[in-house]
Image (cartoon, grey):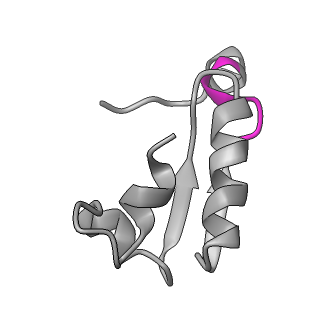
Amino acid sequence: GHLEALADLEYGKAHPELSRARERRVLLYCDSGTRSAFAAVTLAQMGFARVYSLTGGMVVWEAEDKPIES
């Protein structure tokens, strides 16, 4: 519910890195891929040029034995 505010340059408490990422590649992910898909749509509607969501989320990523770094 706070994504719009955090990504808005005109909002006084915007997240500095996110609000400046309008022309950069932004990859979103969550556990199942649902919340990140909604967030990607929201950011695209706000003018972010290159927004991607990990389809299936971390559940699918881990099931396919893909590498994870922390």
Q: Is 56 above or below relative to 48?
A: above
Residue 5 higher or lower than 58, as above or below? below
Q: Which residues are magenta?
A: 54-59
Query: Residue 21 sits in which quadrant?
Result: bottom left
> Is 45 placed above or below 68 here?
below
Count of picture labels: 0
Q: Is residue 23 magenta?
A: no
- The quadrant in which residue 61 appears is top right
Which quadrant, please, contains the C terminus? top left
- Quadrant for residue 31, please give it: top right
Q: Residue at x 35, y 77 (%)?
A: 9
Residue at the location (66% across, 58% down)? 42
**Along the viewing direction, whichever of 21 and 42 lies nearer the viewer:** 42
Report the residue at 62% width, 80% height from top: 49
Residue 37, percent across and down?
72, 44
Q: Residue furthest bottom?
A: 23
Is the residue 30 above or below the residue 21 in the image?
above
Report whether 54 appears left or right of 9.
right
Residue at left 34%, top 78%?
Answer: 10
* Closer-to-camera residue (4/19): 4
- The spot of residue 54 in percent (x, y) is 67, 42
The residue nearer to you, when weighing 9 against 26, is: 9
| x then y, percent, for residue 34 | 73, 31
| Magenta region includes residue 56 | yes
Q: Is residue 54 left or right of residue 55?
A: left
Q: Nearer the viewer, residue 63 or 5?
A: 5
